[in-house]
Image (cartoon, rainbow, N blue to C red):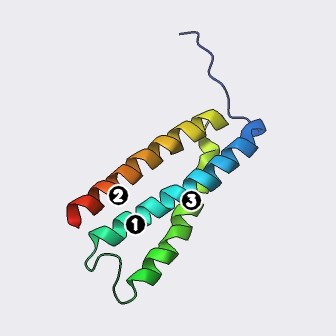
Amino acid sequence: MNARRARLQSRHWLGKTLAGAVLGYTLALAVSGGVALLTPGGFSGEGKVQFNMWMIAPVWATVLGFVFLFRDSLRAWAWLGAANAVAWGVFWGLRAWLQ
């Protein structure tokens, strides 16, 4: 097992930052929409719209903070892209099933 693994480097920060900003935002939207669908009242309800709106920022910030743990920007884009595909698939599946 002499395979050399790439070390974490700061040279991929721009690609990681863009991945976290763009795909992190869309992931936060999907998570917020899923929570809205799974809680009583659907997308409406007293205080629910505000909660879902304010839930986006912490999810987005968490993704943006953890994106720097990827070894390179390509992995960040790939993993967050896959997470987005799953999250949006679950969201659209829940929406079709519940409505």
Estimate the x, y position of residue 19 in percent, counting from the top left.
63, 47
Please give the residue where the numbered disc 1 appears in the rendered image: 33
Where residue 74 is drawn, which disc sits there?
none
* Discs 3, 2 touching: Cβ within 8 Å: no
Q: Amino acid at mark 1?
A: Gly
The residue singled out by tag 3 in the image is 25
Which residue is most to the top?
A: 2
81 or 7: nearer the viewer? 81
Mark number displayed over residue 91:
2
**Residue 83, position in %: x, y?**
45, 46
Residue projecting furthest to the right:
11
Measuring from the top left, give residue 24's x and y in whole percent.
56, 55
- Give the answer, above or below, for where 34 lies relative to 50: above
Q: Nearer the viewer, residue 85 or 4?
A: 85
Which quadrant would the C terminus be assigned to in this image?
bottom left
Q: Do the residues bearing badges 2 and 1 touch, measured as CB atoms within 8 Å?
A: yes
What amino acid is at disc 2? Answer: Phe
Q: Earlier in the sequence, mark 3 or mark 2?
A: 3
Alpha carbons under labels 1 and 3: distance apart = 12 Å
Name the quadrant containing residue 34.
bottom left
Say whether residue 65 is visible.
Answer: no
The residue under label 3 is which amino acid type?
A: Tyr
Left or right: 17 as drawn, with respect to 34: right
Q: CA distance from mark 2 to mark 1?
A: 7 Å
Crowd rating for badge 2 (residues with CA inside 10 Å; few <14, some 14–19, many 20+): many
* Secondary structure of residue under mark 1: helix
Say which residue appears at 52% left-offset and 45% top-offset: 80
Secondary element under disc 2, as helix, strand or loop, is: helix
Q: Quadrant of residue 14?
A: top right
